[in-house]
Amino acid sequence: MDFSVWTSWYSLLLWAVILGVNVSPALAEEVSTPATAGSDGVDVEISGLRKIEDGSVVSNIHTSKWRVFTDSGRDLFLQGKLEEAEKLFLSALQEAKEGFGDRDPHVASAYNNLAELYRVEKAFDKAEPMYLEAIIILEESFGQEDVRVAAALHNLGQFYLMQRKLEQARGVYEVCGKTFSDS
């Protein structure tokens, strides 16, 4: 009996278990900048906003709308109201692009949420390019070894596993494993 195939499948499944493959999608929630020292020296978390060179925070109507569309879309998604959730996720994507630019992590978050929705709907032709674009944006923003990139890769790995594209899933999980073993 040839155990080499079993070993490679076993390795793939082991990585899937280690990385937490489950039936629950990992929806992108919040894009945060690292904690910074406030004027009183106390660390503060600036959630969903990006700092500009002088230390001030960019916040506009797009920030608020992006957050509302994302949160409401996620709630509808979790309730199984996929058509309504899709509309809100598309609105969140538009607000992120208008408010932050096409290459911002907020845009990656919106792409990831849409990709997860399309994965659940089995609209695989729509999902894959969104996963890939989210990964590219996150790599540009944070570097290839960032945990946010690994989480997006994990979602792509789940996507491939769902379609039984095991070699592609394996490749994605190997990259995830390298990210976690290097950190």
Image (tube, helix red, strand yellow):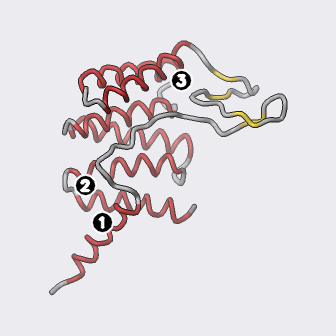
Real-space Cα separation, disc 2 to disc 1, in angstroms = 10 Å
Q: Which mark is residue 166?
A: none
Q: Residue at x 84, y 30 (%)?
A: 40
| Image: 84 above or below 183 | above
Mark 3, Cα crowd under 10 Å, few <14 / some 14-19 / many 20+, is many
Which residue matches tag 2? 161
Residue extending farthest to the front is: 79
Front tag of 3 and 2: 2
**Residue 20: x and y, percent?**
38, 56
Which residue matches tag 1? 13
Q: Residue at x 47, y 23 (%)?
A: 96
Left or right of 69: which side holds 48?
right
Left or right of 169: which side holds 135?
right
Compare residues 46 and 146 and report the one nearer the observer: 46
Q: Residue at x 19, y 51 (%)?
A: 163
Residue type at numbered disc 2: Leu
Residue 10 location, quadrant: bottom left
Q: Secondary structure at mark 2?
A: helix
Real-space Cα separation, disc 3 to disc 2, in angstroms = 33 Å
Quarter of the image that includes the N terminus: bottom left
Compare residues 19 and 170 and report the one nearer the observer: 19
**Residue 107: x and y, percent?**
45, 30
**Residue 65: x and y, percent?**
48, 16
Q: Secondary structure at mark 3?
A: helix
Which residue matches tag 3? 100
Residue extending farthest to the bottom is: 1
N-term-proximal mark, 1 vs 3: 1
Mark 1, Cα crowd under 10 Å, few <14 / some 14-19 / many 20+, is some
Q: Residue at x 35, y 20 (%)?
A: 88
Quarter of the image that includes the C terminus: bottom right
**Residue 81: x and y, percent?**
25, 26
